[in-house]
Amino acid sequence: MIKFGLMSLRRMAELLQSGKLMARELTEHYLDRSESLQGKFNAYITITRDRALKTADQVDELRRQGRELSTLAGIPMALKDNISTQGVATTCASKVLAGYIPPFDATAVKKLADSPLLGKANMDEFAMGSSSLTSAFGPVGNPWDRKRSPGGSSGGSAAVVAAGCAPFSLGSDTGGSIRQPAAFCGVTGFKPSFGRVSRKGLLPLASSLDQIGPIARSVEDCALVLQAICGHDPGDSTSARLPVPDFAAALREDVSDLAIGLPEEILDNCPDSRISAAVEAAARELEGAGAKISRVSMPYERETLAAYMLIATAEGASNLARYDGVAYGCRHTSPSWEEMYTGSRVFGEEVRRRLMLGTFSLSAGSGCSSYELGQRARQKISSHLAKLFAEVDLLLLPAAPFVAFRLDEELDPLTMYYNDIYAIPANLAGLPAMSVPCGEKGGLPVGMQMMAPRFREDLLLRAGYTWQRRTDWHLRCPREVEQ
Amino acid sequence: MKAEGVIGLEVHVQLLTKEKLFCTCPTDFGAGANTRVCPVCLGLPGSLPVLNPEAVTVALRAALALGCTVNNISRFDRKHYFYPDLPKGYQITQHQHPLAQGGRVDTPFGSVDLDRLHLEEDAGKLMHTGESTLIDFNRSGLPLVEIVTGPCLTSASQARAFLESLRQVLLYANISDCRMEEGSLRCDANISLRGGGRTEIKNLNSFKAVERSLEFEIARQSRMLAQGETVPVQTLRWDETQARTVPMRPKEMALDYRYLLEPDLLPLVIDAEIVDRAREDLPELPRPRAARFIKEYGLSPQNAAVLTLTREMADCFEQVVAAGAAPRPAANLLQGEVSRLINQGGKQSLPSPHSLAELLALQEQGSISVTAAKEVLAQMFASGQSADSILSRNSLSQLSDRHALENLAQAVIANNPNPVADYLGGKKQAFGYLMGLAMKESGGRANPGLLKEIMVQLLTKQPINK
């Protein structure tokens, strides 16, 4: 019996290609594990056994015929439930989308057509949250301690990888929604540059910030998934018309010529000194590997969160305007349209809060809307980051200011939003960023984040891979789910 | 004194494209409900708009035909409001940075300044059945340009004349089919009187409705102002059957559209080269064409204006002339009989310019009378056949046979001794009477010149009875 828990995607691909492993066997292993752990972590909204096995059998059949297939063919995956899957319910963890079955696959899903779909991962409702507690399908448990949050909004996508229920998953990141849960669950999460991965088929939160990205065990695994999903899509006008670099080649290079900046305000003010200490230690390790480390300044914590909330809620309110009760959700029958509109809305509390905020943010009132103020702050932050990247190649900082919090902690909304304080600048500026495990606190994973100039995913992969070859944080598994 | 209004129009024009503005659904009219839809124009979650370049080309042509200044960079915005025919909860339009600004439309009463021209998508269509309302999304996402005038019109008739001139240009440049009954040209009118509030009349779908609703509003508002009342700011609709304006959405003016720069689309960049190319593709427009007709063909301004009303007519005129006809007779034929037959409508085909030229030539040669020419033309319309083949099948060719005409004239003279006596006695008018009788006798086919000659000859041979 082969143990798959810590096996790299590359190794799985080799076994599948050589015929030593059948896609069906691999897929059944992950399906069984997903189903048996579902009661414990509630990491899925839908498990799609039939679809997964159908794809696996097709791949096995094509291999038998000697067909050349993509690297990831036969390696199963989980998808965050805001990524459209043809014929499979896509709920965004909301009652509003009950009964909605997309008639098309997201472009990223099409590009992974040979990867059996294990299921649709649980998340915060409409990706609005940092805890996976706002799901209409119940909260997700963190595989390291199921009484704690896996983070969010891609909490299910991170939890399935950490629990060994899926070799990799896709999440989406609007303001840290891939990186913070990856940090909370001790896995690697990668947010590509805005425009690198097509957003077609991603149910949008904030269109100018959203990006689909992989969550996997390691940087090397992420590189393989990125290679598959990146690239221009004529169906997404904002996707970049750029060639996709050879990410595997990037892994072969070291960090000896890289300058890495440590933002001092962030490290000095981090509410958890264990986290800042772990990041500082990682910097020293990378210095040992040849990187040049320096201190830099990112003095806009307050503005970051404010700008993000104004923009993300405004675009979110706009994107959710279509769920007006006419075509989605349970129709409230009422003689007046106004009552039909108000009565048909079954959003959760956090979504309603952000819809109110976003609607207000976009209202012109007298003069300039709050949204425009947010956009101005965003401009300033982006140009400051651009200047920083003239001095350094990468920024190294914590992925989140906390480790996984307890499900019953009842954080007030502002503290909850604070979870993403270190992640947001990358979204505002459209930069690629990655969260990798770099320590532990009380048995819970600590994640560090690296950020690179736009479309320089290769630099993140180089540094991340170098880090993971010198450390074993990414190879640790939660005791609760010994594999 | 009749009150003067301040009127501005917003005209929505559906562009002639094969596909919708942000998806590849076809734009044909009259298809079964919800058969021209896809995830994009249904606003399904996760669908993304992709701008149709053909729509940009046609919109650009509109901007240039109307003399607008094309903005190098224009942007798309989301305009939010809730209405069941709006599947995304917002309409993609161009609010802050329109495709083009300025421009003018020349009308019979002078030039009307335009404020702006921008691209936007159409909404779906509600269909009210007895107890329920159904939605047809075929129209959702159709490409429109909105053309906004300055507040520079002063009367209902001016508004109508403006729309007719605008329509003429749009048809000329192949921008829209401008079929108001199919919704491809729609109009909202803003109207206020000095000292009163502004009202907006929405969704006017005929020229008549525009004119009548504005007449009604001007009368209503001036009556209110005269009685010392205030005219409230309101959105109205025109009730055709009651022939009056009716308040529509009283809270409309308080609506906040919460405009948001469309994050799913890139700015639309139109460089000078694209503008130049579009300008080259622009056909000659009615005004300059009429001027050329006057200069080149020696037509009267009146003739030139009528002939350039539609591009088809103007093209036809030039083709008839190119086929050898003299310009003035060609103009008269097209303006007169041809226009009359076109207006009569029916399933008739416009004769080819070549056969019209042929008809004119036959008339010129005298082989066919004016009356017969009319008959031949009508048959050309009905059958699509050439003048020659119609003439050979029928007895419409002119009667120029001397012997036959002599017999005919002799009979007329013999049967009408009194008028003949009058003529011979010096009453020259009697000649016309006798000519008329002879012509009638020939069924209108007698060659008038030859008949006259024969009549004079025969009459001089008559004995004079005193």
Image (cartoon, coloured by chain):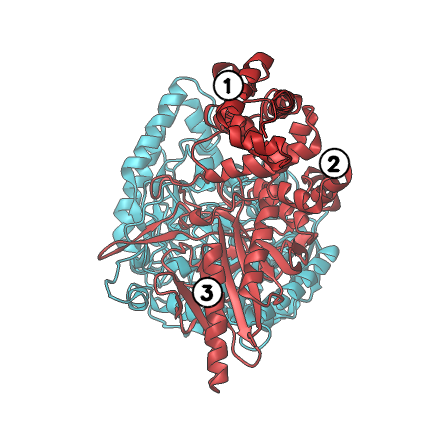
- SS state under label 2: helix
Which residue is disc 2 drawn over?
A: B297
> Is A58 left or right of B442, judged from the image as shown?
left
> Quadrant where the N terminus of chain B lies?
bottom right
| Dot 3: chain letter | B
- Above or below residue A366? Residue A80 is above
Which residue does the image show at 70% across and 64% down from the upper left?
A296
Which residue is disc 3 drawn over?
A: B213
What is the distance, in whole Å, between disc 1 and disc 3 at their CAs?
49 Å
Three-letter code, disc 1: Ile
- SS state under label 1: helix
Which residue is disc 1 drawn over?
A: B390
Q: Residues within 10 Å of mark 1 (few under 14, many from 20)?
A: some
- Above or below residue A404? Residue B70 is above
- The percent position of residue B240, horizontal first and vertical second, equals 38, 61
Residue lying furthest top: B403
Three-letter code, disc 2: Tyr
- The percent position of residue A186, horizontal first and vertical second, equals 45, 54
What color was chain B assigned in the picture? Answer: red
- Above or below residue A80? Residue A136 is below
Three-letter code, disc 3: Ser
Which residue does the image show at 58% across and 56% down from the upper left?
B161
Q: Nearer the viewer, residue B303 or A443?
A: B303
> Quadrant where the C terminus of chain B lies?
top right
Closer to the observer: label 1 or label 3?
1
Q: Nearer the viewer, residue B368 or A252?
A: B368
